[in-house]
Image (tube, grey):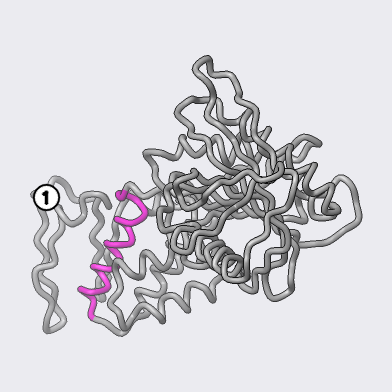
Amino acid sequence: MAFQFSNLRIDRIIVHQVFQRDENRAIVPPKFSTELTVLDQFGISTFQERIVNALGNASHSIEMTISESDANSTFNICSQLLDASHNDFKNNSKSLPLKLAQAQTSRKIPGGILVIFDGQIGPNNKRFIGIIKAEIHSGFSIEEQNNRLLLKYLSELLLTPQQKLYKIAIFVEELRTTSIPKDPENYIVFVYDHNMTRSETQQAAQYFYESFLGCSFSPSNKKLTSDFYTFTKEHINSLEINEEEKLDLNTSLYTYLKTSQNTFIEVSEFANQYFNLNERDSYLEFMYSKGIPERAILKDISYIKYKLRRRNIKFTSNVRISAPSDQFNELVQIEQTNDNRTLVSIKGIISRDD
């Protein structure tokens, strides 16, 4: 069952500041807060809502795999913060901006603030640790007051729709244990980063999810991509629409998976792009019932690359037409269907009889 981003409650927040590397590419020491940040009720409610919107259903957040869990890893630091007292939470959280400063090896990577927060999420109130890296102008205002960096709530600006300007990760504790060190198998991690969902800038986001968070893309993406293809095709072929419409939808599926430049696939995105309004809900319900997540999936066609190489059409008379999938619309034209006959135009002449 897909993870439910609901009932999110934030308990503690602390804010540190990280800086762009200097002209010699040396690390500029972060500025640490020594006190927890307190938002008013309206501010905390909006903050919680924006986190859910960024990471929750129908967003472009990605479930990732924890690949680094040693003593100095971000995962280990975060998992220990869950059980930390307020004083330890404030002191031990300083390790995270230091790790981020080390991960930001290029001067092209801007500084910003690092918001570290914990709380509970989901219908079973599972504990989590969250991290936000935000550029200052993305909606946060920094004030320093008695060695405290304050996250000042700005009514219209907190985590604004300028989504390119912040990155979010949360580590959710699926199974609570007393063991130390914590087992990454008992946690799931979700990451939101606008750059990560764009193929041309995916490498730019790597410092955050790989070098800093110690995470990697899940190997299950091959299976999820394959299931997306299989179940979408199954649903299309079950629709009570004419065969030309089914052909168009199946062509769209091939395009979406094989020829488009998108790095990620998403059920709601495919539904909105290709299904009629009155067909979308049934498609979404069907796909979710089959275990396809509502979140974005890293596209990996390894398991279905042979299926996507050629398009095959079968007629009721057991006649089949096969053509390269990326040229199918150019090579094969369905001219007309009526009276149990289909008029097909094929580019090319007969070269041999197999």
When the figure is inspected, residue 100 is found, relative to residue 288, above or below; the finding is above
Task: Look at 59% across and 35% down and name the residue there.
Answer: 18
Q: Which residues are magenta?
A: 242-260
Quadrant where the image shows the N terminus: bottom right
Task: Look at 50% across and 59% down and name the residue there.
Answer: 154
- Number of numbered discs on residues: 1
Rendered location of residue 22, percent (x, y): 53, 21
Image position of 354 (left or right of 170): left
Is residue 295 magenta-colored? Answer: no
Viewer-side residue, 343 vs 160 = 160
When the figure is inspected, residue 211 is found, relative to residue 280, above or below; the finding is above
Viewer-side residue, 29 vs 69 = 29
Task: Look at 36% across and 50% down and name the residue there.
Answer: 262
Q: Say if residue 226 shows up in the picture.
A: no
Q: Main secondary structure of the magenta part?
A: helix
Q: Secondary structure at mark 1?
A: loop
Viewer-side residue, 90 vs 179 = 90
Task: Look at 46% across and 35% down and name the residue there.
Answer: 203
Viewer-side residue, 164 vs 145 = 145
Q: Residue furthest front?
A: 146
Is residue 246 magenta-colored? Answer: yes
Q: Say if residue 207 shows up in the picture.
A: yes
Residue identifier under label 1 = 350
- Residue 181, quarter of picture: top right
Mark 1 neighbour density, 10 Å: few (under 14) some (14–19) many (20 or more) = few
Disc 1 residue type (three-letter) = Ile
Q: Residue furthest top?
A: 24
Rendered location of residue 16, percent (x, y): 65, 42
Rendered location of residue 69, percent (x, y): 76, 40
Rendered location of residue 208, percent (x, y): 56, 39
